[in-house]
Image (cartoon, rainbow, N blue to C red):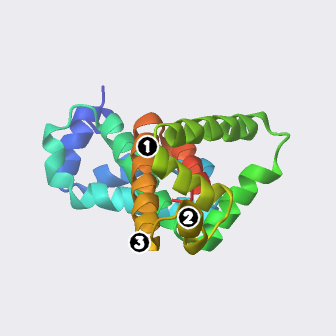
Amino acid sequence: MDRTHHPESLSVRLSEGDESAFREFFHLYSHHIYNVAFIMTKSAGLAEDMVQEVFLKIWLSRASLTGVENLKAYLYTSARHHILNELRKKSHNLQFTDALLEYFSESADNPEQALLRKESRGFLHQAIAHLPDRQRLVYQLSKEKGLKQEEIAARLNISQHTVRNHLAQALVNIRHFLERATTGTLLLICLLQAGL
């Protein structure tokens, strides 16, 4: 096999700072990373940015590639982590969150999206069911009934400070449950539905 196309050789050349190896590496795999990013963001611009950022990180940490046995798997793992982290950050951006929720709510005729919505609701219900009783009640009154903290405090005859503590801990517990139980787009949809 030609040295330039052998994966082990490619990782060695990359680790040595060979720019032609990096261009070859980018050409071989960038389209796949773009496709995954686009599927998860529904934005060509965001997907392109994520591709650039993933490959930039690889290039900046190229010296560590000497010990990498499977370069393709290493790249895909790095890309998955980067894309998921970026989606989590962007989920706090109201416009991005609204756009993503709209995408998943407007296409009920799409079986894949309908399945994702159904799965995400199921995981969220499980996460809520695993909460201690008082946390679950406070969460449901806040997120499902839309009550304000002072209204919850009055209804349960507890202080607003206690309501805030229960709600904060409930959100932490729900996030931990969902991060253990789900990944990727499904995790993001669950987090958005949970109000995280």
The image position of residue 173, as x and y in percent, is 40, 48
Tell which tag, 3 or 2, sits nearer the viewer.
Answer: 3
The front one of 98 and 75 is 98
Label 2: which secondary element: helix
Cα distance, mark 3 to mark 2? 39 Å
Residue at 14 percent across and 38 percent down: it is: 67
Mark 1 and mark 3 lie on one chain; the one further toward the N terminus is 1
Amino acid of disc 3 = His
Q: CA distance from mark 1 to mark 3?
A: 18 Å
Q: CA distance from mark 2 to mark 1?
A: 39 Å
Give how far across and how far down residue 35 sits, in percent: 57, 47
Amino acid identity at mark 2: Leu
Where residue 107 sits in the image (x, y, percent)? 81, 47
In percent of the image, x 62 and y 35: which residue is there?
122
Label number found at residue 132: 1
**Residue matched to label 2:** 46
Q: Residues within 10 Å of mark 3 (few under 14, many from 20)?
A: few
